[in-house]
Amino acid sequence: MDRAIIDQYEQGGQKLRDAVRGLSQVDLLWVPPPDADVGRWSIQQIVLHLMDADLIWTARMKCIIAEDDPLIVGYDESKFAAELFYDQQDADSAIRIFDLNRRQFAGVLRKLPDSAFSRAGRHNERGAVTLGQSVHWMVEHVEHHLGFVRRKRERLGKPLKD
């Protein structure tokens, strides 16, 4: 595994922070119309989803590191978004938690031998999942959702500046 992925993983918090910089609470809570082709969640829901997903996958990755063939149980992200008051939570706090979690766990990942990234758990829906795959998925997960944030910002007339 190319260990540069750990740096990309760690930078996810800063990328998320940069993606929402300058947005008002109204902007964060704007729900796009169904035909907008920018996803169905508000930017705030995306932020909270990323935090929750990251905390869950970090716990899963810890199990893969520390346990033999742990069971990894899926969850319904849409139910989380609908039932966990994402629109009433603080997006800035969620970003700080996300960023701190990434920075803290990146330190663990850097200390592991290369062989640890081949360790696997058994996901109840996906089957075998290695630590290396998990790190890659978490990097890709942020990029996937940042694409929606960029498109939503464009619809709001507040595009990201490169």
Image (cartoon, rainbow, N blue to C red):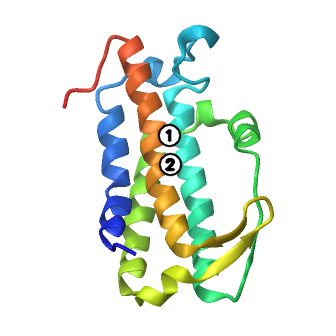
Q: Residue at x 47, y 40 (%)?
A: 144
Figure quadrant of residue 134: bottom right
The answer to whether 121 appears left or right of 15 in the picture is right
Total numbered badges shown on the rendered structure: 2
Q: Residue at x 33, y 11 (%)?
A: 157
The residue indicated by pointer 1 is 47
User: Which is more toward the observer, 39 or 97?
Assistant: 39
User: Which is more toward the observer, 1 or 43?
Assistant: 1
Q: Residue at x 63, y 61 (%)?
A: 56
Q: Amino acid at mark 2?
A: His
Q: Amino acid at mark 1?
A: Val
Callout 1–callout 2 Cβ contact below 8 Å: no
In the depicted structure, whether residue 34 falls above or below residue 9: above
Instruction: Tell me where residue 21 appears, x and y as whole percent.
Output: 30, 33
First reached walking from the N terminus: tag 1 or tag 2: 1
Instruction: Tell me where residue 150 appears, x and y as whole percent.
Output: 38, 27
| Measured Cα–Cα span from mark 1 to mark 2 | 12 Å
Instruction: Tell me where residue 88 appears, x and y as whole percent.
Output: 60, 32
The residue indicated by pointer 2 is 141
Quarter of the image with the N terminus is bottom left
The answer to whether 82 appears left or right of 146 in the picture is right
Find the residue positioned furthest to the left.
162
Question: Label 1 neighbourhood size at 10 Å, few (<14), some (14-19), many (20+)?
Answer: many
In the depicted structure, whether residue 106 falls above or below residue 57: below
